[in-house]
Image: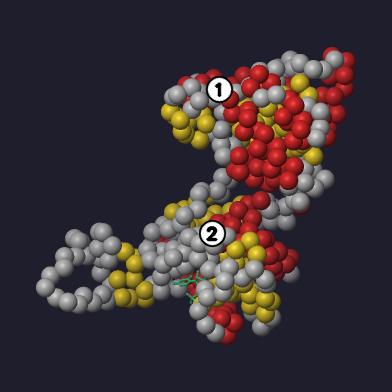
Amino acid sequence: MLLKDKTIVLGVSGGIAAYKALDLTSRLIKAGAEVKVIMTRSAAEFVTPLSFQSLSKNAVASDMFEEPKVWEIRHISLAKAADVFAVVPATANIIGKIASGIADDMLSTTIMATKAPKLIAPAMNTNMFENPIVQSNINKLGSLDGYHFVMPESGRLACGDTGRGKLADIGVIFDEIMRLALRDKADLRGKKVLVSAGATSEPIDPVRFITNHSTGKMGFSIAKAAYLRGADVTLVSGRSTCEPINGIKTVNIFTAEEMHKAMTVLSKDADIIIMSAAVADFRPEFEAEHKIKKGSDEKLSLSLVRNPDILSELGRQYGGRKVIIGFAMETRALIESAMKKCAEKNADFIVANNLKTEGAGFGTDTNVASVIEKDGTVTEYPKMEKFKLANIILDKAVDILSK
Ligand code: C5P
């Protein structure tokens, strides 16, 4: 119930994507928020206010149903109640009104009266979205304090056109609302967090490479949790099955050497460094210029050379000055080798998980981990969502930072 005691005022303007705001309402309610919906006249043509009312258990404000004198009072009370004011979907019309200071209906009037952070998720036809007037309105609002956007995606639009204008994923919008709603409790605000995730790949020839089963889920969960806690997050990601995370700078790399370079540069500014990537210890000594053909030989040998140990290097350079966290995935003697690793790599702590434990390991949404700290303390955690474990890891990092 992360959003308990938070009020989200949700403005719904008139577009076909208005129905997706129902899903958003439901997710916000499930997260414990109080949701108060305001619909424009045209939004109510697409979806009935009753649907929002049923989900939110609150009356829906819409100028279609309100007496003007009640309206005057309600727009102020709603404006004050909002911890976050979201407009989902936002049409070119409502964006234009907000940017020009026009307040001629319930939604535009309330948004003008609110001091809450505003989150605008545009959705419209591509040509409308690309219209320089719409773009300049978005840029104008984006440059003002308190206005945040989750930009639309490209895709097939309801009108049949293909292009940019499709409402962003509701999960992404939900995360952004959550981040804004929790900004007062954001214990990583002002902190720079650098996370590595995914698998490195080591080329053999232009066609083949050596890699591992890492999907990046743990690292992406840490990056997302840090972002929601207010951090300025950079993610250095190798091969991964995860979608990019809105609001997080992501540097995509292929090889361990590329990850090494990126982490070396980006670590300079970081307060917390979390190496959750599965970095190949070795790479082929030479990458063949052309595809290796099978000849008559029954065997083929690859000569491998060591990759740099990024965590060790960063630990050596910044240990004690920045928070350094590593991971250890083993198939046996987990705690012993994690302890050794923590000391050798000069990390503050190591998050260790055994690949053989059910619910832990590659590609799962859960993990079963132990945290081994540099003073030798071992804490074992039960099976839990990777996102929850990410927050436990960050709690520990915040704790170390505060010391
Ligand atoms: O030594 P081992 O590979 O088990 O250590 C795992 C930890 O070290 C992980 O945090 C991983 O991201 C990091 N690592 C690294 N560079 C390597 C190998 C592992 O930073 N070449």
The residue positioned 73% from the left and 46% from the top of the image is: 30
Q: Tell which circle, 2 or 1, labels the residue nearer the N-terminal end.
A: 1
When the figure is inspected, residue 169 is found, relative to residue 88, above or below; the finding is: below
Front-lying residue, 99 or 318: 99
Q: Quadrant of residue 95?
A: top right
Q: Looking at the picture, which amino acid does disc 2 mark?
A: Lys
Q: Looking at the picture, which amino acid does disc 1 mark?
A: Val
**Mark 1 crowd level (few <14, some 14–19, many ≥20, 10 Å Cα):** some
Of labels 2 and 1, the one closer to you: 2
Q: Can you give x and y, in whole percent of width and height, for residue 335 in the image? A: 59, 82
What is the secondary structure assignment of the residue under circle 2? helix
The residue positioned 56% from the left and 81% from the top of the image is: 334
116 on left or right of 211: right
Disc 2/disc 1 C-alpha distance (Å) = 36 Å
Q: Can you give x and y, in whole percent of width and height, for residue 60 in the image? A: 78, 27
Q: Is residue 162 visible?
A: yes
Q: Quadrant of residue 305?
A: bottom left
**Mark 2 crowd level (few <14, some 14–19, many ≥20, 10 Å Cα):** many
What is the secondary structure assignment of the residue under circle 1? helix
Q: Can you give x and y, in whole percent of width and height, for residue 333 in the image? A: 55, 84
In the rendered view of the protein, which quadrant contains the C terminus? bottom right
When the figure is inspected, residue 177 is found, relative to residue 278, above or below; the finding is: above
Q: Report if the beta carbon of the residue with label 2 is closer than 8 angstroms to ligand 1.
A: no
Q: Can you give x and y, in whole percent of width and height, for residue 139 in the image? A: 57, 29
35 on left or right of 317: right
- The residue labelled by disc 2 is 217
Front-lying residue, 378 or 375: 378
- The residue labelled by disc 1 is 134
219 on left or right of 306: right
When the figure is inspected, residue 372 is found, relative to residue 9, above or below; the finding is: below
The residue positioned 44% from the left and 68% from the top of the image is: 279
